[in-house]
Image (spheres, rainbow, N blue to C red):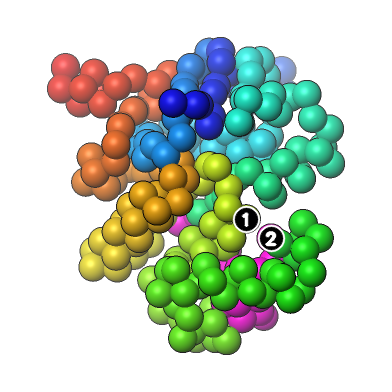
């Protein structure tokens, strides 16, 4: 099976004055097409840094990130932005929807940014909103949606470009248990129907254990779930 994401010897440090703070240390990871991967870690362990690197939002201090066999380090800033739009979707703990736009307009936005015609973008957004069960709420603004509906809208926005990889940062962390379960079921259904790979960063062990594979990020290194929790 082909790899959607590969991280090779991935390292990241931040400079504060003369002090260098290492965050990721020669991290190695491969994610295959259609895989659901959970990465668990405590606050400050480098989860957000990892997502920024894996999502081509930031560049590593050393090492490589390959998405669909493309080394993102070889791309210019403009090329990297275009590549993100085509190949990667993002889901955050807080939905980051634009409050002045309807659910439909929010979902269509990545396609509009890519240069699709408004008609084509709205049609694709309509189809994806129906896929996540929100066809009847397409003309509502985020302030008129429940927390679960906002997160479904955010998932639809991540899916609308048909990315190979979706990176999710605590996607159920701001939801009650019933709504979190609905979001998990939706992620699982979409994963199976679209064969989209999901990398879900979370501190929720219950959610993590329901993924296909689990890893723990600690002190800049990844370890297996068994090593992390059963030693």
Please give the range of residues in magenta.
92-110
Q: Which mark is residue 133?
A: none
The x, y position of residue 153, in whole percent, is: 50, 69
> In which image quadrant can residue 113 be found?
bottom right
Which quarter of the rendered picture does the N terminus lie within? top left
Which residue corresponds to the image point at 49% horizontal and 61% vertical from the top-left?
A: 155
Please tell me whether mark 2 sits on a helix, a strand or a loop: helix
Left or right relative to 81: residue 229: left
User: Label 2 near label 1: C-beta < 8 Å?
Assistant: yes
* Neighbourhood count class around disc 1 (C-alpha, 10 Å): few under 14, some 14–19, many 20 upward: many
User: Is residue 86 or residue 207 the one in the foreground?
Assistant: 86
Residue 137: tell me if it is visible: yes
Q: Which residue is mark 2?
A: 110
Residue 99: tell me if it is visible: no
Which one is closest to the eye, mark 1 or mark 2? 1
Q: Which residue is mark 1?
A: 161
Which residue corresponds to the image point at 84% horizontal and 32% vertical from the top-left?
A: 76
Please tell me whether mark 1 sits on a helix, a strand or a loop: loop
The x, y position of residue 187, in whole percent, is: 37, 55
The x, y position of residue 11, in whole percent, is: 58, 18
Task: Examine the structure image and report whether residue 163 is included in the region drawn in magenta.
Answer: no
């Amino acid at each position: 099976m082909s790899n959607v994401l590969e991280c090779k010897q991935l390292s990241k440090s931040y400079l504060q004055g003369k002090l260098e703070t290492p965050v990721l240390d020669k991290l190695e990871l491969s994610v295959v097409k259609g895989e659901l991967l959970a990465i668990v870690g405590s606050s400050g362990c480098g989860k957000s840094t990892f997502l920024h690197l894996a999502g081509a939002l930031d560049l590593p201090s050393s090492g490589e990130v390959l998405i669909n066999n493309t080394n993102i380090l070889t791309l210019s800033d403009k090329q990297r932005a275009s590549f993100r739009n085509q190949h990667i979707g993002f889901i955050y703990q807080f939905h980051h929807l634009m409050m002045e736009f309807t659910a439909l307009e929010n979902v269509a936005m990545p396609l509009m940014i890519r240069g699709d015609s408004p008609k084509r973008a709205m049609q694709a957004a309509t189809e994806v909103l129906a896929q996540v069960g929100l066809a009847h709420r397409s003309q509502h603004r985020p302030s008129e949606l429940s927390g679960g509906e906002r997160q479904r809208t955010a998932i639809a926005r991540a899916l609308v470009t048909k990315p190979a990889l979706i990176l999710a940062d605590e996607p159920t962390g701001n939801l009650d248990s019933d709504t979190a379960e609905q979001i998990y079921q939706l992620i699982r259904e979409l994963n199976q129907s679209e064969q989209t790979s999901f990398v879900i960063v979370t501190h929720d062990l219950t959610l993590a254990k329901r993924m296909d594979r689990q890893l723990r990020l600690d002190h800049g290194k990844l370890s297996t779930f068994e090593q992390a929790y059963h030693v």
